Image (cartoon, grey):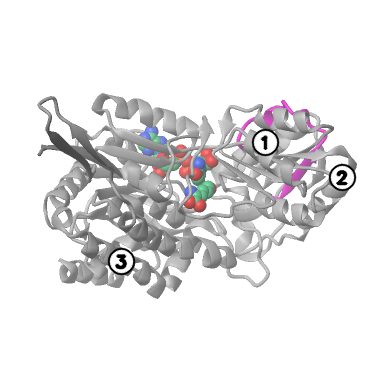
């Protein structure tokens, strides 16, 4: 098992020339086959790897391998052993930290500092958190009276669902993929991951890690490819897959829901957002500017939780806008490993076109461009990267298209308000409901407005502060279900009630 896969890994690495070859990982080993496609480094626009698109037969091979794992060694494993293996996965990610870092940076172009402090550590932390979560949950027990005057004991046991499909996006590739893989595996499921076609490297590397630490063959599989009429859709349609856990665009979630209906799969969706932030005049303004400039521009705005609409109470509006402008203009676009780079590229040329389309639309809709609005001029290798300027608008109507549609870039509209009621009304006037961030020093208002936000996660005086045991997900069109701590365990397992007549 482990030794054989290890040998395959070595052979795979030895055959690498300049481009990394990202094979499908099935049944504990990298397999041949699939149509090659290019993986680009967004910071330079150069191809850095080749992945192999899984066709229907390869997806079916993965499902069969996963099923075998559930019915075999992985399914029979004690909880203690399973937990120990997941902790070993976390340790091995940490031991191979620099390789994960390099792979994540190559796929995304994000600044070294960001991947070093956020993406890779969270990839490891997810395994530790869910190894703990699974150990600390009880199940329910009821003793009942029976019609004949006796007793019966009911108790629930938690069972894995079987084969779980994980479909992940490109913005925080390792973080978001392991956020789902770790609890699914902690519950004893076998997983098949379809990473984003833009960012398959760290998921592939995780296949190596799984084999190295001795995760049984087939418990973790990776298939590469695209969505429609490709690996993603084939996975969703496969009758052998019991659940799909998905992070990505709302529109994609809707397509997956439809494709999953004939085989009645369990679904967990973390989808798009158009997140509001609300800054009251009583807020610590420096903290709000520091917090919300980070929130709007981190990962070049490619964070589902990023505030793209910021409502600011009129008396502090001008000071807030000036502060945000200063922060945006202090960001330095550049290559991930260049000293001083604080702003990476967007993920692709196509995504850049979409974001620049919104930059133009904002002007057409009457925006005042406070800063940005274009493409930065960069020299050397970064000249062909997919960079855009961090951008701030004022003067937009709250119902302008740029204030309603998710941009997923480093851009925000700042809009004044005059009363708490107005701020709440505008913040909630959206079809999305992922996250919000409220800034105030008034304790009652913090509770009142925090609660009034129609979102899955409502931050007060902070943003993206995460306790991984808490429920995470979106209201309205931002998601279906909640993950995190026992919420994840509840999704990735199903209770089975045993009733014993005493
Ligand atoms: P996307 O929906 O385009 O793609 C996500 C994944 O779905 C990819 O792996 C893709 O190949 C796959 N896919 C696409 N069409 C499919 C289909 N028909 N069947 C099966 N699989 C399919 O999203 P993206 O562009 O990769 O990511 C950005 C989006 O993700 C944004 O909308 C962002 O808000 C959202 N997001 C949400 C969260 C959250 O926690 N709510 C987190 C991160 C990103
Ligand atoms: O922190 C997490 O667990 C999480 N799911 C973050 C989502 C970020 C969206 O881009």
Looking at the rendered image, the disc whose residue lies closer to the viewer, 1 or 3, is 3
Give the x, y percent position of residue 131: 33, 60
Assess whether residue 108 is covered by the magenta stretch: no
Looking at the rendered image, the disc whose residue lies closer to the viewer, 1 or 2, is 2
Looking at the rendered image, the disc whose residue lies closer to the viewer, 3 or 2, is 2
Query: What number is the disc on residue 209?
Result: 3
Marks 1 and 2, how far apart in space?
Answer: 27 Å
Q: Quadrant of residue 494?
A: top left
Query: What number is the disc on residue 358?
Result: 1
Q: Residue at x 40, y 59 (%)?
A: 129
Q: Residues within 10 Å of mark 3 (few under 14, many from 20)?
A: many
Marks 3 and 2, how far apart in space?
Answer: 51 Å
Marks 1 and 3, how far apart in space?
Answer: 40 Å
* Residue 208 shows in this picture: no
The residues colored magenta run 387-406
Q: Residue at x 36, y 56 (%)?
A: 133
Q: Residue at x 51, y 37 (%)?
A: 474
Give the x, y percent position of residue 20: 37, 63
Q: Return the disc, 1 or 3, that comes first in the chain's sequence.
A: 3
């Amino acid at each position: 098992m482990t030794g054989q896969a290890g040998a395959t890994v070595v052979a795979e690495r030895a055959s690498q020339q300049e481009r990394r070859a990202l094979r499908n990982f099935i049944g504990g080993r990298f397999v041949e086959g699939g149509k090659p496609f290019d993986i680009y480094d967004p910071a330079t626009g150069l191809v850095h790897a080749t992945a192999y698109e899984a066709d229907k037969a390869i997806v079916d091979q993965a499902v069969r391998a996963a099923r075998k794992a559930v019915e075999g060694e992985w399914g029979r494993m004690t909880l203690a052993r399973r937990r120990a293996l997941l902790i070993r996965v976390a340790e091995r990610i940490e031991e191979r930290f620099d390789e994960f870092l390099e792979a994540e940076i190559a796929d995304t172009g994000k600044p070294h500092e960001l991947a070093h402090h956020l993406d890779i550590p969270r990839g490891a932390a997810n395994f530790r958190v869910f190894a703990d979560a699974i150990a600390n949950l009880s199940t329910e027990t009821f003793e009942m009276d029976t019609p004949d005057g006796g007793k019966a004991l009911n108790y629930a046991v938690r069972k894995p669902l079987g084969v779980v499909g994980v479909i992940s996006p490109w913005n925080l590739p390792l973080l978001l993929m392991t956020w789902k893989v770790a609890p699914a595996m902690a519950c004893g499921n076998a997983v098949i991951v379809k990473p984003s076609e833009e960012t398959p490297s760290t998921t592939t590397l995780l296949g190596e890690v799984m084999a190295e630490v001795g995760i049984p063959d087939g418990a973790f599989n990776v298939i590469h490819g695209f969505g429609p009429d490709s690996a993603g859709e084939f996975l969703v349609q496969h009758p052998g897959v019991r659940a799909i856990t998905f992070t990505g665009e709302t529109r994609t979630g809707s397509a997956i829901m439809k494709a999953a209906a004939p085989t009645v799969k369990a679904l967990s969706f973390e989808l798009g957002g158009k997140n509001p932030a609300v800054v009251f005049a009583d807020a610590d303004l420096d903290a709000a500017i520091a917090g919300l400039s980070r929130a709007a521009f981190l990962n070049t705005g490619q964070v589902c939780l990023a505030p793209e609409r910021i409502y600011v109470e009129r008396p502090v509006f001008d000071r807030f806008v000036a502060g945000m402008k200063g922060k945006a203009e202090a960001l330095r676009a550049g290559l991930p490993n260049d000293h001083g780079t604080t702003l990476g590229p967007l993920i692709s040329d196509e995504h850049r076109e979409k974001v620049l389309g919104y930059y133009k639309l904002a002007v057409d809709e009457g925006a005042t461009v406070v800063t940005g609005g274009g493409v930065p001029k960069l020299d050397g290798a970064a000249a062909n990267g997919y960079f855009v300027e961090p951008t701030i608008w004022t003067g937009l109507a709250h119902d302008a298209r740029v204030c309603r549609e998710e941009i997923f870039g480093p851009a925000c509209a700042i809009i004044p308000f005059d009363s708490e009621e107005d701020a709440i009304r505008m913040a909630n006037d959206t079809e999305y409901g992922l996250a919000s961030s409220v800034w105030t020093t008034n304790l009652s208002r913090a509770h009142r407005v925090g609660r009034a936000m129609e979102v899955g996660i409502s931050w007060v005086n902070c943003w993206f502060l995460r306790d991984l045991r808490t429920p995470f997900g979106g209201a309205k069109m931002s998601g279906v279900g909640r993950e995190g701590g026992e919420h994840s365990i509840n999704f990735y397992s199903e209770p089975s009630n045993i009733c014993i007549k005493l």
